[in-house]
Image (tube, grey):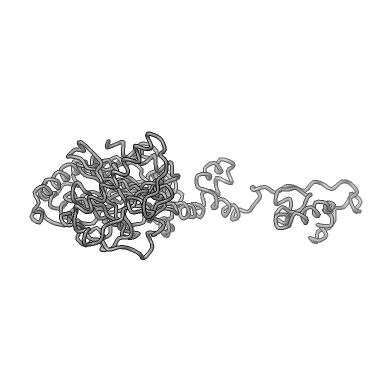
Amino acid sequence: MAVCARLCGVGPARGCRRRQQRRGPAETAAADSEPDTDPEEERIEAGAAPPTGAGGGPCTGPAPSPPRCSLLELPPELLVEIFASLPGTDLPSLAQVCTKFRRILHTDTIWRRRCREEYGVCENLRKLEITGVSCRDVYAKLLHRYRHILGLWQPDIGPYGGLLNVVVDGLFIIGWMYLPPHDPHVDDPMRFKPLFRIHLMERKSATVECMYGHKGPHNGHIQIVKKDEFSTKCNQTDHHRMSGGRQEEFRTWLREEWGRTLEDIFHEHMQELILMKFIYTSQYDNCLTYRRIYLPPSRPDDLIKPGLFKGTYGSHGLEIVMLSFHGRCARGTKITGDPNIPAGQQTVEIDLRHRIQLPDVENLRNFNELSRVVLEVREQLRQEQQQDSEGPAPPQEPPSGRGPSGAPAEEGGEPRVGAAAEQPAHSGQGQPFVLPVGVSCRNEDYPRTCRMCFYGTGLIAGHGFTSPERTPGVFILFDEDRFGFVWLELKSFSLYSRVQAAFRNADAPSPQAFEEMLKNIQSLTS
């Protein structure tokens, strides 16, 4: 026992620490009350001869203290296992302890495990030996060096924004730009293309390559400005040019961006918007600044799971919107935008306290009937805000126990904040839904059944985000993955479908960090 105790670092008395951890309190106390084990007995049990004096007889003097065992005395293969289980950021400090540790830390097994557990590199890293690159080089010069750019980012491209996910992909770090499907196919999957990649071709340093254009990878540069911001630069922009000049570049971009030719687009205003976007975005030549964004945190009482959605925005095509929940309201923030409402702005805001009971299908076809219902809720909301500013009013119970919006009411007449819980979003219940006559819709293939509706406001503005104002509308929840919004003033309907792509390193470290991120991206375009 004393030998085991010394190995565990607790000394020759008090028994083995590992054995104590397996005992209960009573057994531990009993063990502590026993006399210390005689070292001579241990030697006998181990088959060792007892120490002898000068005359060959038993030694009568005090037994010498046994040497303590330290990490330095452990075999190298055991040290490799211990070091491989530590975070890679702690290993450089460990290498400074002594020459033995520094030599062991050159073992590739340690760094292969750190690459796999910390960054998900599942490739056969032994193949690197052919190029003379070690797993330690991959960890230190590629993965650890560029760890701060992993995650979800929004490029600064004026009002248009964008969505970039930087991930470890095999032995590369790749920046994937995600694009909405071609208008108006909102239920189609997202498209994506690489903008840059970083890899280790030799022992010196990582190589950054620009992937923009159609001539293959070429020399690029990445500068990490600060923790949540970095920039990219292409050093060979001639690789972005095409032999047919700007006209060929525009037609190629149009096919990729819109899936059609200019001759297929008959709407003159849409042609102008498309040409304007091409001129504006192409001038950057993949020399961009990116700012970190997070996916919204999810709570058990959320109406549906928050996240990213693709939405129809008339002549502007499909745009990416982030739906998040904030207590009594939900917000849709633009990740991609347009010259009217730029990226970063809150395109819709939903008041979860005011649920709307839609008219029956026949009356719903009448736009004036829907407008009347929504404006009644807006007036009710205005009165509530006025009462809040003047002080609490005595409760008044509405007839039939329902609020003016048609939502179940608590005592006092206020629509319940949790009214939606009475008909959860995942339930099979619903009511028929049809768009009123005269309401424009880019995608006629919208659901014909909805689960619940709420009062909301939508942000509209002139070109260049001039004279922005919030106008009333209706938020329609169809199912877990689709919702819509009727813009009363514009007489138009936007359909939103969930982005099903899985984004890595995109979760917010805290709800406060997510709220701060929303404020930052909105302030950039305000």
Say left or right for 411 vs 104. left
Q: Position of residue 173 (x, y in %)?
A: 36, 50
Q: Where's the C terminus, which quadrant?
A: top left
Q: Which of the two residues, 120 or 160, is positioned nearer the viewer here?
A: 160
Q: Is residue 478 left or right of residue 417?
A: left
Regarding residue 211, the answer to whether it shows in the image is: yes
Q: Nearer the viewer, residue 518 or 406?
A: 406
Regarding residue 150, the answer to whether it shows in the image is: no
Q: Position of residue 510 (x, y in %)?
A: 45, 44
Which residue is at 35% across, 51% downward? 403
Residue nearer the viewer, 137 or 271: 271
Can you say whether 478 is above or below 9 in the image? below
In the rendered image, residue 329, in percent from the top left (x then y), is placed at 36, 46
The residue at 35%/59% (across/down) is 480
Which picture quadrant has residue 344? Answer: top left
Q: Nearer the viewer, residue 239 or 299?
A: 299
User: Which x, y percent locates residue 469?
Assistant: 24, 39
